[in-house]
Amino acid sequence: MAELVFAKSAALTMGVELELQLLNARDCDLTRAASDLLSQVAKRSHPGEIKPEITESMIEVSTGIHTRFAPLRAELRGIRDTLLEVAAQLNVGVAGGGAHPFQHWSDRRIMDAPRMQHVSQLYGYLAKQFTVFGQHVHLGCASGDDALYLVHAISRYIPHLIALSAASPYYQGVDTAFDSSRLNAISAFPHSGRAPFVQTWDGFNAFFDKLRGAGIVESMKDFYWDIRPKPEYGTVEIRVFDTPLTVERAAALAAYAQALARWLLVERPHPISEDAYLAYSYNRFQACRFGLEGEFIDPAAGSRRSIADEVLMTLGALAVHARELESEVALREIEGILRCGNDARWMREQHAVSGSLPDLVWRQAERLRDGARRAGLQ
């Protein structure tokens, strides 16, 4: 069988994909507007890409390749502005957040595209339940071996990324008691969770050939791991972020991941082994359930502390790397999340004021539109 070739890519470049909610302007429920929106977007020149997702109530936007935070943030703002302008002409709202607070999955319509129809036929109702909204961050790697090192090294910090980005406390009309309920929907898919402990690209090819030969997978798209190599791009793809409520926060989270990857590659602060995954499921659950207040256990160090304290310690280690990458502003945004809370906290605070989930969704749409002013990053 043909081997997976890991494409050439500059180390530590980054790109972002965001899945966004399309809203009925009347009642703030999800609406089937993706095809109409895409047809209008196709008539315009705009930065990045604006593409379909699994259902008609979603849209995916993606950036080009960047080395620095500021240009990445600028492109995300440009994509947002184009999308919102077209959506307004169609009387459609657009919002961030990891899950729509009160939509019903059975009302969704699968996009009329071969890949989407294949997923629907394979996974049944899970495909419609997959109407959840995430941010994916791609980090360039010089080789497949480096990519696999980062897959395992970053896995220790997956709870950080979940807790910092958590923005899906409400689902199907109820408070789930989770900061990130979105990842529970993804966990229903086969090949979700963590990647196997393989350290070389030759070893990964052998692993993939076994699964492909047995008819278990056809391509890398069949893996729904929290973080996975993306050989056709020459990247690792981190997939655990809920879509933030602003593109400014999305850019900051990507820059945090970039600085984290630089620190891990340059300083190699932790040995990687299968034992590094001993607490993986526990720490991941704590991040989804309790966010920054969740508990983080490090079996190697024999320590247990809050995820917020873990992030704070890590920010200290990343400071020199953020300076080299010109992303100090991004790390200040991360510090702001530690002080003021993640998007899940903001959503609960807003709902406590009005008691209305449609009003909350409207405020989410306002926050996306006014993100630059609200984030104070202009």
Image: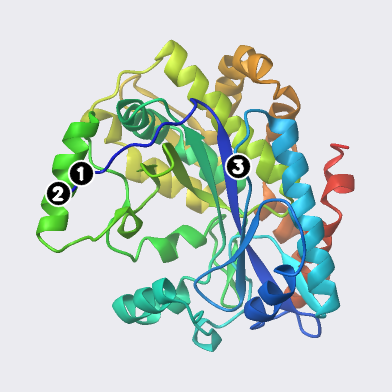
Q: CA distance from mark 2 to mark 3?
A: 36 Å
Horizontally, residue 6 falls left or right of residue 287, namely left
- Category of crowding for the residue at label 2, using alpha-carbon neighbours closer than 10 angstroms: few (below 14), some (14–19), many (at least 20): some
* Residue at screen point 77% across, 73% down: 93
Rendered view: 341 above or below 97: above
**In which quarter of the view is residue 356 placed?**
bottom right
Q: CA distance from mark 1 to mark 3?
A: 36 Å
Q: Are marks 1 and 3 in contact (CB under 8 Å)?
A: no
Which quarter of the image is occupied by the C terminus? top right
Residue picked out by circle 3: 164
Rendered view: 229 above or below 97: above
Label 1 sits on a secondary structure element that is loop
Residue picked out by circle 2: 209
**In which quarter of the view is residue 126 placed?**
bottom left
Residue 45: x percent and y percent?
Answer: 76, 59
Give the residue type that dot 3 points to. Leu
Identify the mark nearer the N-term, 2 or 1. Answer: 1
Give the residue type that dot 1 points to. Glu
Q: Nearer the viewer, mark 2 or mark 1?
A: 1
Residue 144: x percent and y percent?
Answer: 32, 31
Residue 188: x percent and y percent?
Answer: 34, 66
- Category of crowding for the residue at label 3, using alpha-carbon neighbours closer than 10 angstroms: few (below 14), some (14–19), many (at least 20): many
Residue picked out by circle 1: 3
